[in-house]
Structures are given as C-alpha cells and as structure tokens.
Image: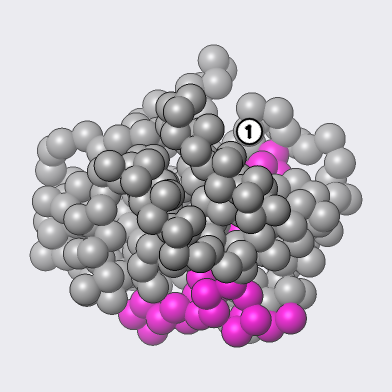
Amino acid sequence: MTGNDLPGGVYRTGDLDLTRFGYGAMQLAGPGVFGPPKDRAAALAVLRTAVALGINHIDTADFYGPHITNEIIREALAPYPAGVHIVTKVGARRDEQGGWPQSRTPAQLREQVHDNLRNLGLETLDVVNLRVGGLEAPEAGSIAEQFGALADLRRQGLIRHLGLSTVNAEQLAEAQRIAPVVCVQNLYNIARRGDDDLVELTAGQGIAYVPYFPLGGFSPLQSETLHAVAERLGATPLSVALAWLLRRSPNVLLIPGTSTVAHLRENIAGAGLYLPDDAVAELDAIGR
C-alpha cells in the first residue's frame, strides 16, 4: 500500500505532501498519556507499520508522556525515511494531576521546540503547531507574541513550517500576518460543526484542516443516529465518522490514534468506507 492507496490520497499544503490519513501518536504513551506504554514493542510496531503502509504524517507532542511518545517515535523511525513528516505541538505541559496547563511564554515555547528536537532526534522540525485554546474550544485573544516567537525559530532554521491548534479565524488571520500557516488543528466532527466556516476558509487558502476527537462531544441522540447508520452499512461508528470527515472537504487530514497494528489497519480500511448519499444526508443532519 502507498500514500495514494490510503483513504483520500495525498494533500499538498505549502511545499508539504501529507497523506490525508495520518497517525496520531498520543496513545503511544501510558494510561492517561503519562509514562511508558505497557507494551513498548507494540508501540514501535504501530509506527513502523504506519510508515510501511504509506502514512507519512505523524502527529505528536513532547508533552505526551511527557517526552515518552517522541522518544518512541525516534526509536521506531530514526533515521527517518524520506518523505515522512513529523508534526508536533507546543504551548502546553502536563501537571501531576493529569491536566494540560498552558505553557506559552516565548521562553517556554523555545524550550519546548528544543525538547522536541532533542527527543525526536531531529535538527529541524517539519511542522510545529502552536496550541492556543483548551482541549475543546479556542480562547479569544492575541497570539502575536507566541506565534512571533515560533516565527523567529523558523527564521533560524529550527522549524520548516508553522501551524495552529484550537484557534479561531481571527487568530489564524493574525498569525498569517506574521508567517505562513500550513495547517489548523481543531476539534471538529459530525456532531461538533462549529468550525464549518473555518473548514471552508482554510480550504480556500490551501491550508490543511486537521480535526481531532472524531467521536467527541456527541449527545446520546446523535450517537444513536451514528450507530444506526454504521449498523446499516456494516461498519463501525468510528469508520463512518472518519469517512464522513474525509468526504467533508479535500483539505481535511485525519490523525486517528491507536496502540495496536490491528486497530491501525481497521482504521485505514474504515476511513475508505463508501458513504451513500442517503447516509451522508442523515449524518449531516446530526450537526444541524
């Protein structure tokens, strides 16, 4: 299997060619995204299988673990095959209570970039996303100082491309006045459609839109509808949700995570599910 065989093929954002079906590495850390995984060999196998299947878009963050996930990625993939792109995030940390507090002063962002470089074993990071809001929604306010700090590191050659995570349209526009943005990573799925306009905006500008939590935030009624469609199609709810996202817009890139090779293969196959028009209409109605 190659990148062109993966669901949705390849999307070009800036001078990056990213498979639309990527891999989110958060689940490679231990329970609660803390500490090492129970089965390190399985974690290594997932990453190596993902690349062998043609996935070239690996999403991570050094605060997963913390540090653990990036160390596993380096062990599994370094020296990195040509064309494999590691996309990481900065702007948060982990606390002892399992929270994700902000860590966004220029000094903290510089430190996080260097942590990512060291733990991934890279001299330059392909893409660094500035995480701005909380887990589920953007937080209003200027991001010029924070994004400017990352733009300085880009000028120094430590970062090739910049992206944003959990932002609104105004923050995207503000960032673009400082440096190019190649991707936006926000919460978005069939039920949580608040970013519909941002999906369209980024598509029009050639910016990749990377949704997370494909099954997050569903009401019981919405979940019931999704399960009914999945049952009718002989598929899983996750497969239907992923297939819907790929169909939603050509600039949508997926980063579902898993800690097993079997589930990775199931996710890829499921995302290639054909959704008939009546199923799409029923699913579209969930978010209205």
In this image, 222 relative to 265: left or right?
A: left
In the displayed structure image, the side of residue 177 where residue 110 appears, left or right = right
From this viewpoint, is residue 11 visible? yes
The correct choice, above or below, for 171 with respect to 157 in the image is above
Residue 51 place in picture, x, y as percent: 71, 71
- The type of colouring in the image is one colour
Towards the viewer: 3 or 102: 3
Number of numbered tags placed on the structure image: 1
Nearer the observer, 165 or 143: 165
Q: What is the x, y in percent for residue 283?
A: 43, 49
Whether 6 is drawn above or below 66: the answer is below
Tell whether position 91 is magenta.
no
Residue shown at the point (44%, 78%) measured from the top left = 11
| Kind of residue indicated by mark 1 | Val
Q: Which quadrant is home to the C terminus?
A: top left
Is residue 208 at least partly visible in the picture? no
Q: Which residues are magenta?
A: 1-29
In this figure, which residue is indicated by the disc labeled 1?
33
Say few, some or many: other residues with alpha carbon within 10 Å of mark 1 (under 14 / 14 to 19 / 20 or more): some
The percent coordinates of residue 235 (x first, y second) are 67, 53
Q: Residue at x 72, y 33 (%)?
A: 30
Q: Position of residue 114 (x, y in %)?
A: 48, 53
Disc 1 secondary structure class: helix
Q: What residue appears at the point 76 percent right and 61 percent down from the top-left corner?
A: 265
Q: Does 101 appear above or below 117? A: above
Tell me, yes or no, whether the highlighted magenta stretch contains residue 20.
Answer: yes
Q: Residue at x 64, y 27 (%)?
A: 32
